[in-house]
Image (tube, coloured by chain):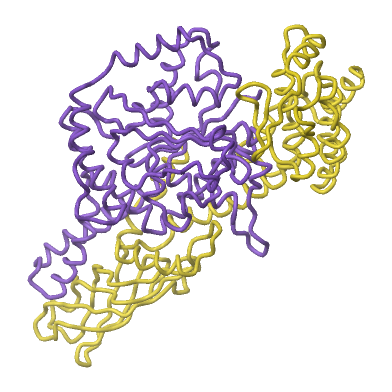
Chain colours: A purple, B yellow
């Protein structure tokens, strides 16, 4: 088979294509090496295609900083709030200033808000769709696999649905889209899937982003850690009732992993998910068919992984997930609230939240 | 038969040129497939391979249109409908190729859990696995039935890819144009406050179609604060030209307008100044040029003022540097 392409789409926070590639390559190389019967290395058998959309939000954030710093300074020089117009301008400017700082809100949560509620989502979706389409042209759709994490699951879901249904606007001609029956993707992996909580126009569960006969991919997998507080907000939970996909397709083409192992505080992190054997083995199975490992080496890999068990972190995580939802009813606000709780807990264990 | 296939693939390579990278992430022509390396001869399914190569040749040697490639694919699938017969056929008397014809050539995934395919609710698996394994081994020692299924998957995908590539490159071209359009918008348009971004988003969503769409043609301006330099003849000497503040109460900007002498937009403004001898408040209008520069007039109880403002976002924001970072990481 041709070399598969694994398209990587990150979540909230600051990511470049290099950091994303390095993070995934490191953890999956290590995971692959746990199975000595496999040939070569992970990186030698797959082409990684990291797609960073962070620049669109960073561009806007920097524009606010550059716009408001001199304005704020000038307002002070002109007498601050002494004049009515100055106080009005300061009031308007306060919102801008609040959004252009460097705190965690601005580098993480703002991404979710800008994606969910502003037109900046459109160039982000086009950017991701173009990368996926480019991979399909290059390798053939069956050799293209997508790995999305956190906010990236919402971006990928929206991008794929439009790519395979309404398509792209063209001047003077009808729009053009990919044919989901002929350009069917190899697999789509939604790690820490929050697409249902963040859905807007394209409803998860009713969209074309599903496996099999009525979808755009041969296989669909989602990974939702039981103790990840972020994915517990309105999770995507398709039933095997023949409505989302047929019964045989639900069993054969849909993989729903709900791991509970904890080896670090940030169970929402992509690295933590990919290190879990049930996660990376399924990914390898779809990337490198026919994928066969020995029972003995699977047992050894599991033992190695479980040896890193972190009980204190697990106990702290359970406290978060057992806290009732806050006063906010909206899933986006609840998701941000849960994310903040996790971030605070992770910081307590001196880990980085990403 | 094997010689025939070798000749076909040799012709394909000779005409297309030496093996090269083939289709790339920004290919714009389905004939990029013609740069692909020649496929290896198949010992398990030589007839299927021959037909798959014929489909590719229709594109690469005969410069076939999408319709012609479609007909070639239909012929290939129909003419090889009995490929599984020597291996004992499919269970339940099913015929995979008939399904492919009836379903308008859907893609097949590789068999992951042994030799079988699931299409909606139908399983296509060998009627007699042992017989299938035996025949595969007789054709090529060491091979099993699963290898036959993998081979068919590869050959069918090779043929189907020839047809699918037309829509794939056309969609990629459209997305590339949209992406370029949005790049221009983000580089050239007027800076927006969060309030304006929210308002313009509402306006954009109200008019946008369901497909991937280009950026809006216009930007609404709403309560946008700015620094201005205002000249008031009615003010006392020494304070006639002074910096001040203004708020664009409402306005519009057409960001695509590039001719320097044509306005890109305009706003109704309110401004305030603290100068002896003149009323603090003024109202007026402003015209914008090049998405960055604004000139306006104000009136204070009949006293006219002239002001000019520079959009600091456009002047000092180095959008190119930020965009260059993501295009050249």
Identify the residue at horizontal 29%, vertical 74% (top origin): B248
Identify the residue at horizontal 21%, vertical 66% (top origin): A92
Q: Is residue B33 left or right of residue A76?
A: right
Decide which of B34, A316 is in the foreground and name it: A316
- Looking at this rendering, what residue extends furthest in the front direction? B92
Identify the residue at horizontal 37%, vertical 44% (top origin): A235
Residue A3 in the image: above or below residue B55: above
Picture quadrant where residue B107 is located: top right
Question: Residue A296's x, y, as percent?
Answer: 45, 7
Question: Residue A336's x, y, as percent?
Answer: 26, 47
Numbered-mark total: 0
Question: Residue B152's x, y, as percent?
Answer: 75, 26
Identify the residue at horizontal 43%, vertical 29% (top origin): A21
Decide which of A28, A307 is in the foreground and name it: A307
Q: Is residue A129 left or right of residue A1?
A: left
Decide which of B158, A118 is in the foreground and name it: B158
Residue A333 in the image: above or below residue A153: below
């Amino acid at each position: 088979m041709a070399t598969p392409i694994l398209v990587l789409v990150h979540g909230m926070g600051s990511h470049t294509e290099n950091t994303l590639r390095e993070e995934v390559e490191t953890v999956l190389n290590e995971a692959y090496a746990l199975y000595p019967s496999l040939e070569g290395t992970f990186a030698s058998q797959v082409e990684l295609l990291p797609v960073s959309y962070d620049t669109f939000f960073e561009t806007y954030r920097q524009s606010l900083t550059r716009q408001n710093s001199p304005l704020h300074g000038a307002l002070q020089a002109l007498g601050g709030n002494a004049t009515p117009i100055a106080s009005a301008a300061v009031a308007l400017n306060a919102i801008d200033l609040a959004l252009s700082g460097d705190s965690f809100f601005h580098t993480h949560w703002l991404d979710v808000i800008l994606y969910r509620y502003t037109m900046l989502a459109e160039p982000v979706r086009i950017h991701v769709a173009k990368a996926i389409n480019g991979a399909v042209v290059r390798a053939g759709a069956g050799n293209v696999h997508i790995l999305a994490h956190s906010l990236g699951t919402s971006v990928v879901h929206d991008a794929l649905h439009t790519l395979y249904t309404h398509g792209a606007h063209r001047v003077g001609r009808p729009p053009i889209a990919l044919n989901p029956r002929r350009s069917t993707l190899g697999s789509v992996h939604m790690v820490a899937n929050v697409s249902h909580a963040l859905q807007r126009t394209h409803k998860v569960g009713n969209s074309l982003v599903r496996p099999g006969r009525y979808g755009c991919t041969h296989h669909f997998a989602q990974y939702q850690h039981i103790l990840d507080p972020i994915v517990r907000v309105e999770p995507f939970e398709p039933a095997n009732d023949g409505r989302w996909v047929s019964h045989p397709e639900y069993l054969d083409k849909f993989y729903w992993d709900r791991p509970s192992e904890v080896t670090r505080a940030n169970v929402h992190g992509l690295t933590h998910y990919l290190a879990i054997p049930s996660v990376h083995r399924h990914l390898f199975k779809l990337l490198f068919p026919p994928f066969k490992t020995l029972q003995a080496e699977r047992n050894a890999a599991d033992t190695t992984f479980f040896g890193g068990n972190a009980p204190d972190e697990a106990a702290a995580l359970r406290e978060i997930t057992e806290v009732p939802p806050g006063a906010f009813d909206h899933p986006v606000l609840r998701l941000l609230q849960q994310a903040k709780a996790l971030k605070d807990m992770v910081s307590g264990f001196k880990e980085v939240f990403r | 038969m094997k010689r025939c296939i070798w000749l076909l693939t040799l012709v394909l390579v000779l005409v297309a040129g030496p093996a090269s990278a083939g289709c790339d992430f920004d290919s714009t022509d389905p004939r990029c497939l013609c740069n692909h390396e020649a496929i290896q001869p198949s010992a398990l399914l030589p007839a299927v391979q021959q037909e798959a190569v014929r489909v590719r040749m229709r594109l690469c040697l005969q410069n076939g249109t999408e319709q012609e490639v479609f007909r070639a694919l239909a012929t290939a699938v129909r003419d090889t409908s009995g490929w599984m017969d020597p291996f004992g056929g499919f269970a339940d008397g099913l015929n995979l190729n008939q399904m492919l014809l009836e379903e308008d050539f859907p893609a097949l995934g590789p068999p992951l859990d042994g030799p079988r395919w699931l299409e909606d609710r139908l399983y296509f698996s060998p009627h007699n696995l042992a017989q299938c394994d035996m025949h595969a081994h007789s054709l090529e020692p060491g091979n099993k039935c699963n290898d036959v299924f993998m081979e068919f998957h590869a050959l069918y995908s090779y043929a189907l890819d020839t047809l699918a590539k037309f829509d794939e490159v056309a969609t990629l071209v459209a997305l590339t144009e949209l992406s370029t359009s949005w790049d221009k918008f983000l580089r050239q348009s007027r800076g927006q406050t969060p309030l304006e971004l929210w308002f313009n988003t509402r306006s954009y969503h109200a008019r946008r179609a369901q497909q991937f769409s280009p950026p809006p043609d216009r930007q609404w301006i709403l309560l946008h604060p700015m620094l201005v330099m205002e000249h008031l003849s009615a003010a006392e000497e020494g304070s006639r030209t002074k910096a001040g503040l203004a708020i664009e109460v409402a306005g519009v900007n057409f960001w695509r307008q590039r001719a320097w002498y044509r306005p890109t937009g305009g706003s109704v403004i309110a401004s305030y100044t603290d100068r002896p001898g003149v009323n603090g408040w003024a109202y007026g209008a402003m015209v914008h040029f090049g998405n960055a520069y604004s000139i306006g007039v104000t009136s204070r109880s009949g006293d006219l003022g002239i002001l000019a403002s520079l959009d600091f976002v456009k002047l000092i924001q180095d959008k190119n540097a930020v965009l260059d970072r993501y295009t050249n990481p």
